[in-house]
Image (tube, coloured by chain):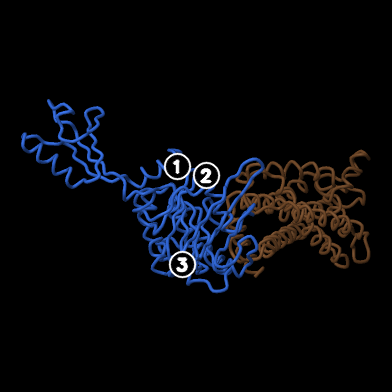
Amino acid sequence: MILHQFRYDLLAFLRNRQSRFFTIVLPVLFLVIFVSVFGNHEIGPQNVKASTYYVPGLSAMGVIAGSFVNLVISVTAQRESGVLKRRRATPVPAWVIIAGRALTAIVVALGVMTVLLLIGRFGYGVELPTSTLPGVVVTAIVGAVAFCCLAYALTTVIANEDAAQPMVQAIMLPLYFISGVFIPNVNLPTWLRDVAEVFPVQHLADGLHHAFDPATHGTGIVWADVGVLALWGVAGLAVALWRFTWTPAAATA
Amino acid sequence: MDEAVISVRGLRKRYAAVEAVAGIDLEVRRGEIFAFLGPNGAGKTTTVEILEGFRKRTEGDVSVLGVDPAHAGSAWRNRVGTVLQESAAEPGLTVRECLELYAGYYDAPRDIDETIALVGLREKSETLGEQLSGGQRRRLDVALGLIGDPELIFLDEPTTGFDPSARRAAWNVIDGLRALGKTVFLTTHYMDEAENLADRIAVIAGGRIVAEGTPRTLGGRERMAVRISFTLPSGIAIDELPLQASAQNGHVAVESERPLADVNVLADWALGRGLDLPDLDVRRPSLEDVYLELTGGAA
């Protein structure tokens, strides 16, 4: 049943030009721009090539775009247009609708990341991790799931679909900047890094950076980062379970 | 045929300070089309949402298909179809894909092609839902409400915003549900819709049922005086007429308990003087007249 829902949600996602742009094209665009601008200088705390730095960093952005951004916007729109309410009037269990949509988001997130990795590998010659591949996969999956939960939590405070897009960008853009997605955060003042440490973006990016670092050995899984992501996911899930509504906010008088 | 599909006793719903539904009784029998009318803010939507299981009641007994909708699970939802007042198309899916998605939600769905044909969307089955016209989209909504092959269907203002021909087409679809043996709970703002489709009508105003009956008998309509009206012929004063009448801007109205005899008196009188009675009209109060009377003109 989840797969039934997943199939149609994925179809709807792929047909939506706006979601294709914001989740797939935008991260790819950022990758091309950043690598072109900074070339192959050595940057970041590990002194790796710019491309090796940006592939995992922007993969984090791709995962977030695929899970969080995509989900917040589409779920808010579906709620406000009465689509969720109509589905709720059918026998399908609530969790199937939610899990089916979340699964779409997770698959899209991993798909976007794969696209970025392939561009990095074949466009810029970035070495793909081999022994540390589990670090990439585990961090990305835990991150995607956590950001799905956070997305459902965030929809509960967004009044309508017009507010959804600016809201997610307003939350995510500053976090991308302070979390090492766009610029290595060693360049940031300590207090700003401390702020970033609190939020999940930093831990998703750091987990992926670590797995890509040629100096890393072992599985490449940074359990501290995975743990923080999981905690955020649980917190998001709790808020979603507590506050999530199926009916348009505008009509709930 | 008189098995109760919906049975409501003493239903109340209070929001903070307001009592939106102030103790109503309703009964809808199997196979009938039941129209539920009322002005905005009269408690209509609240009542429907309680019956659909979307809202909790404050007080009273509610049974829909033998189950309390407040605690209904998916077995119950398999037997109920819901066409909501406002719901957009599923984004990014064609008409057929929408129906495939929803068919997958039910244990024993109707045939998809047959359902598309029933609502007259065969030529549009490969069109994206968001590209349909308003009327076509509403028919898709009806199709989505029917795809589970429900026994009972809630239709909330199914034709609001339709042009006259689209409305006729929608009526044919709804009338066709009767032939399928479905029970329909219809809410509408249009009196002609209720009159054309409904077996029985209930009117809610101020949270109470103010009238219940067939379209012909609602609010004592069948016993109401018939109004005979015409334009006063020139050169004739109103007190020259053979019947008690009132006039406004030269337009005369006679309230009549015995319309046939009174028309006869008028005709004899006019023909005897070689007069015409322009714009002669004999009519019972329309359902709309009765409704406006019942709801205090608050439609």
Q: CA distance from mark 3 to mark 1?
A: 28 Å
Q: Chain of mark 1?
A: B
Q: Are marks 1 and 2 in contact (CB under 8 Å)?
A: yes
**Residue type marked 3:** Arg
Look at the image and give the colour of chain A: brown
Q: Residue at x 81, y 52 (%)?
A: A57
Residue for badge 1: B295
Q: Chain of mark 2?
A: B
Number of other residues with Cα within 10 Å of mark 3, as a class: few under 14, some 14 to 19, many 20 or more: some
Closer to the camera in the image, B125 or B48: B48
Q: CA distance from mark 1 to mark 2?
A: 9 Å
Q: Earlier in the sequence, mark 3 or mark 1?
A: 3
Residue for badge 2: B42
Look at the image and give the colour of chain B: blue
Relative to B188, B237 lies left or right = left
Q: Quadrant of the C terminus of chain B?
A: top left
Closer to the camera in the image, B113 or A20: B113
Residue for badge 3: B30
